Image: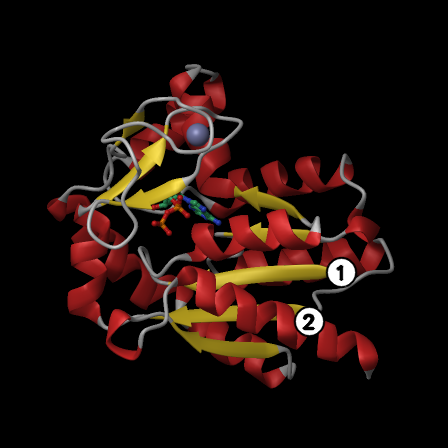
Amino acid sequence: MIIIMLGAPGTGKGTVAGILQEKKGFKQISTGDIFRKNIKEQTELGKIADSYISKGNLVPDDITVELVKSVLDNEDIEKGIILDGFPRTINQAEELDKYLKSKDNKVDLVVNLTTPEKEIIERIVNRRVCSNQECKTVYNLVLNPPKVPDICDKCGSKLIQRDDDNEETVKARFENYTKQTSSLIEYYDKKGILFNAVVSKEINKLGADVARDVIEHIDNMKKR
Ligand code: ADP
Ligand code: ZN
């Protein structure tokens, strides 16, 4: 099974994908996390990616598509994959479809997350992530704080703020989402595989609640 997480920055893609990985045993593949790991390790890919990410721009399609293909080549797709943050352009989506077709496979479900804009900004500013690359658990200082300040509940590592979680970069990330990514909603809706979910404290639905709804949906899909 192949699941895609779609949604503007800060809607909770990583949180929902992380819970799906934990509860369903699917493998979460986050292009943002892979880029950040490469930036930290100062690889060639990391240097190129950083020049885009630090400005809030998308990494070019050819680089991103090759990266995802090489990751998927080494994964057991049958066990279930969650693509978190990929695709982000129509071209990436088409390339993914082509790749999966060549493996006799396809995207099964696209989870589209939306959150009111004012909540998003608040969430991004208060977001902290576990610095341990193997863990990467996401916290929110207000909505979902760690038990001990600045320390990950799960692994005890230090929590950090992402470099691109600053106001200026967030603005660019939003603009790029609207210009380049939002048209994917229609692309997948036409294929009939879109699952829409609102993540908002106003309706008492946070990432964990939405993850539960997605799991219920997946279990019902399998029965059909
Ligand atoms: P968010 O959804 O909060 O912006 P991500 O961790 O998914 O965070 O992505 C961080 C950054 O990594 C993006 O702003 C973008 O620059 C880059 N990136 C991630 N995935 C892609 C992709 N599929 N195509 C191009 N750039 C990407
Ligand atoms: Zn941790």
Decide: few, some or many residues near mark 1? Use Cα within 10 Å; few <14, some 14-19, many ≥20: some
Tell me the residue at 30%/67% (across/down): 178
Residue 84 higher or lower than 68, as above or below: below
Which residue is at the front of the view, 55 or 194?
A: 194
Q: Which secondary structure lies at badge 2?
A: helix
User: Which residue is painted at 65% across and 81% down in the image?
Assistant: 191
Position above or below: 47 against 206: above
Residue under the point 16% across and 56% down: 122
- Within 10 Å of disc 2 (Cα), the crowding (few <14, some 14-19, many 20+) is some
Question: Which residue is identified by label 2?
Answer: 218
> Counting residues from the N terminus, which is met first, the one under dot 1 or under dot 2?
1
Type of amino acid at the residue the image marks with label 2? Ile
Mark 1 within 8 Å of ligand 1, using the beta carbon? no
Instruction: Indicate the quadrant where residue 148 lies.
Output: top left
Query: CB under 8 Å between callouts 1 and 2?
Result: yes
> Depth-wise, is mark 1 or mark 2 nearer the camera?
2
Tell me, for residue 1, which label it has, or none.
1
Name the spot of residue 167 as percent of width and height, x first: 12, 47
Q: Residue furthest left?
A: 167
- Outermost residue, top side: 42
Q: Is residue 110 left or right of residue 38?
A: right
**Quarter of the rendered structure image containing ligand 2:** top left
Residue 52 x/y as whole percent: 32, 37
